[in-house]
Image (cartoon, helix red, strand yellow):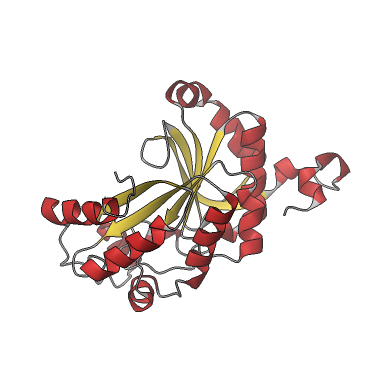
Amino acid sequence: MLTSSLSSPSRSIFDPLQLTGEIHSVETCGSVDGPGLRFIIFTQGCPLRCLYCHNPDCRDHQGGQTTTVEALITDIQHYRSYMDASGGGVTVSGGEPLLQPQFVAELMHQCQTLGIHTALDTSGYSDLASAQQVLQYTDLVLLDLKSYDPQRFTQVTQVSREPTFRLARYLSEIGKPTWIRFVLVPNLTDNVENVANLAQFVATLTNIEWVEVLPFHQMGAYKWEQLGYDYRLQETQPPSPELVARVCQQFRDYGLSVR
């Protein structure tokens, strides 16, 4: 849980609105990271090294913009009418937002105080205590499940799947509304057994509103080249409509709502 300095600002020795964080950029009217039109904040820094990452420039902890909660709230308020009219809100993405739990928690706290819907887009790769700081002010979680098979998960991300799956189970235990996101990459994450096992696992969770099957694309490839990173999926094509349909049906076979 958050410390009393955040939950009770009057007793704090600092102004929580002045908390600073490192962000990469913002998108003012996003439409794919949660319901409605959303103000999306991309945080800087990520512990994963996903082979298909379309934001590799968010990877390093350094190189972002230092900003305050207060500055972001001021900016967010300019788009309030669009969010209210569309049933939208604020989404914190990345990078990995849970690397900056105090900053993200206070930002979401202030949003909720203003009646703004909050969403967290996360890989789930975090210790539970850090995640809990943010989750108490989160209305919706967008949780990326990269693979079910442990070896394939590590191949895709360079990290263990355990923290992510532990968080998935915890979100179910506390009944936190969650959308599962699965990136479908031909010859990498599309194995029939891998998808079936993932669908079976997700079906055990009681808090899942949607599963989003996200077809792989090459739109971030130019960033890898600019940064001098080794992009191993240069020859990988987006999945065919038939492959997307097969994977969506696998999730539906376990009673899950898919889009």
- Residue 247 point in image, percent of width and height: 22, 56
On the image, the x and y values in percent for residue 90 come to 51, 37
Q: Is residue 54 left or right of residue 129?
A: left
Which residue is pictured at 81% across the width and 48% down the height? 5
Q: Quadrant of residue 56?
A: bottom left
Q: Is residue 249 left or right of residue 181?
A: left
Pick the front one: 167 or 131: 167
Query: Is residue 191 shown to the viewer in this render?
Result: no
Q: Is residue 214 left or right of residue 48?
A: left
Quadrant location of the C terminus? top left
**Where 161 falls versus 204 (above or below)?**
below
- Comparing 231 with 228, the one in front is 231
Q: Residue 223: x, y in percent?
A: 31, 59
Res 238 → quadrant: bottom left
Please tell me which residue is depicted at 27% across the width and 50% down the height of the picture.
Answer: 252
Give the position of the N terminus as an image quadrant. bottom right
Q: Determine if residue 108 is in view.
A: yes
Q: Nearer the viewer, residue 242 or 227?
A: 242
Q: How many labels, in total?
A: 0
Q: For this rendering, which residue is in front, 102 or 138?
A: 138
- Residue at point 24%, 57% (across, down): 250
Looking at the image, residue 113 sits to the left or right of residue 80; the answer is right
Q: Residue furthest bottom?
A: 151
Above or below 256: residue 84: above
